[in-house]
């Protein structure tokens, strides 16, 4: 019993450290993951662990999704690239079920606080670079100050972090005046930071997040929610558009690229449109089980040489839905959607509002942002998704 208590305390310390390190450093987060997984594997009590995993439909859906990638190697021609994709997907079988069995209800607030502290550090560094107080480092530039990760990952993570802070402001009845003021300042600074950095997917998700939050705040008042959305979203958008040079330029650039796509072939928007067109042809020819886990690059290259030989080939269509449909067909597509379905369904069972609301918001944000990038392949976004999923959808009342 004493050993179990010590092990549990060790797990919780490691989880808090993981929550803190995962937005800041790949090496540090991976080190925590390795230590957690090794401890879990050698600590015994396997029947209890197995029972917890097998009795949660989300865990089963996650494991099935991973296993389909392994099975997809059977009909792939590029086995080495297939193994690369399988390695990218290991979180769904090698991390999520493990974290699920060791997270504790009483420590959830500590996980979230550690994560938000790391986001605060990231944000402070972002502002220091932006104001040219410190020299740009790692991924950051003065024009696009995202130091610890690229803007592609940073802005979606910042959007979800802003949601957590705003939820505390609106719903935490025990919050002190000082904490309320601190959180309000944090939320405002995060919102400004959202638009001085360049992640367009994250900015779109930010507006989606605000819409979801408004519906949650004005519970069961749909007309008022819609009115609030039609006021708040345009006000923030216009304010950001008129005050942030980077946001202004990137919005105008997207509009120009969409209107004049034939003249902007090598831009991110036009390339994504071309990826979608060519990928859809592969999907139509292999609708049920796809071309195999490793064959997207080869199959895309064949189509691209015929349809758009002047444009570059791709190893990733920058759309998670398209990637899964090409690789694993409708079988893989519905397997992936089942993960999000069970997340939303399990959220309604939570008696605690922050867990219930965040549990609904997390999958909805990913469902939107995966339209513009394969966010379940990226280290930072996938790790955040897996980490929060490990406790947002756990029934802590079950023994």
Image: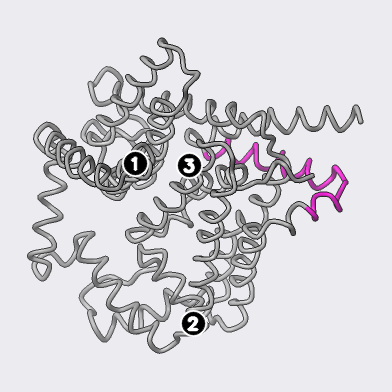
Of the two numbered discs 2 and 1 on the same chain, state the one appearing first in sequence. 1
Q: Is residue 47 magenta?
A: yes
Marks 3 & 2, CB-CB < 8 Å contact? no
Viewer-proximal residue among 67 and 80: 67
Q: Is residue 11 above or below residue 385?
A: above
The label nearer to you, 2 versus 1, is 1
Give the crowd class for mark 1: few <14, some 14-19, many >=20 residues within 10 Å: many
In the picture, measured across the screen, residue 212 lies left or right of residue 349, that is left
Corner quadrant of residue 2: top right
Q: How many marks?
A: 3
Magenta region: 26-51
Q: How is the image coloured?
A: one colour
Which element type, helix, strand or loop, lies under badge 3?
helix
The span from disc 3 to disc 1 (Cα, nearest Å) is 17 Å
Q: Residue 362 or 143: which is nearer the viewer? A: 362
The x and y percentages for residue 9 are 76, 27
Q: Magenta includes 37?
A: yes
Position of 52 relative to 60 (above/below): above
Q: What residue is disc 2 on?
A: 291
Task: Looking at the picture, tell me which residue is in the foreground, 256 or 138.
Answer: 256
To which quarter of the image does residue 199 belong? top left
Residue 358 is tagged as 3
The residue where tag 1 is placed is: 155
Query: Which of pointers 3 and 1 lies earlier in the amino acid sequence?
Result: 1
Q: Earlier in the sequence, mark 3 or mark 2?
A: 2
Write the residue at 21% across / 61% down: 269
SS at mark 2 in the image? loop
């Amino acid at each position: 019993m004493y050993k179990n208590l010590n092990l549990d305390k060790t797990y919780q310390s490691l989880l808090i450290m993981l929550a803190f390190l995962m937005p800041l450093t790949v090496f540090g987060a991976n080190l925590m993951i390795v230590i957690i997984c090794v401890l879990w594997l050698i600590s015994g009590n396997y029947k209890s662990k197995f029972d917890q995993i097998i009795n949660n439909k989300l865990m089963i859906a996650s494991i099935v999704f991973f296993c389909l990638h392994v099975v997809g190697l059977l009909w792939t021609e590029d086995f080495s690239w297939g193994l690369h994709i399988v390695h990218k997907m290991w979180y769904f079988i090698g991390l999520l079920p493990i974290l699920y069995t060791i997270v504790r209800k009483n420590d959830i607030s500590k996980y979230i606080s550690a994560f938000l502290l790391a986001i605060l550090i990231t944000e402070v560094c972002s502002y220091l670079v932006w104001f040219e107080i410190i020299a740009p480092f790692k991924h950051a530039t003065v024009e696009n100050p995202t130091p610890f990760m690229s803007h592609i990952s940073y802005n979606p993570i910042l959007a979800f972090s802003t949601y957590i802070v705003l939820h505390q402001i609106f719903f935490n009845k025990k919050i002190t005046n000082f904490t309320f003021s601190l959180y309000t300042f944090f939320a405002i600074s995060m919102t400004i930071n959202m638009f001085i950095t360049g992640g367009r997917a994250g900015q779109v998700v930010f507006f989606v997040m605000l819409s979801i939050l408004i519906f949650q705040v004005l519970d069961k008042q749909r007309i008022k929610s819609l009115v609030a959305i039609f006021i708040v979203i345009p006000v923030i958008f216009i304010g950001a558009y008129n005050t942030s040079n980077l946001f202004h330029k990137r919005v105008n650039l997207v509009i120009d690229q969409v209107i004049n796509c034939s003249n902007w072939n090598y831009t991110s928007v036009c390339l994504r449109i071309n990826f979608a067109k060519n990928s859809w042809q592969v999907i139509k020819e292999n609708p049920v089980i796809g071309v195999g886990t490793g064959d997207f690059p080869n199959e895309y290259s064949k189509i691209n040489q015929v349809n758009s030989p002047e444009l570059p080939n791709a190893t990733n269509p920058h759309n998670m839905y398209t990637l899964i449909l090409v690789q694993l067909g409708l079988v893989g597509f519905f397997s992936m959607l089942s993960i999000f379905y069970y997340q939303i369904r399990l959220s309604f069972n939570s008696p605690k509002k922050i867990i219930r609301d965040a549990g609904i918001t997390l999958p909805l944000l990913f469902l939107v942002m995966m339209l513009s990038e394969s966010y379940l392949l990226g280290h930072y976004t996938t790790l955040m998704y897996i980490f929060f999923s490990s406790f947002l959808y756990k029934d802590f009342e079950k023994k």
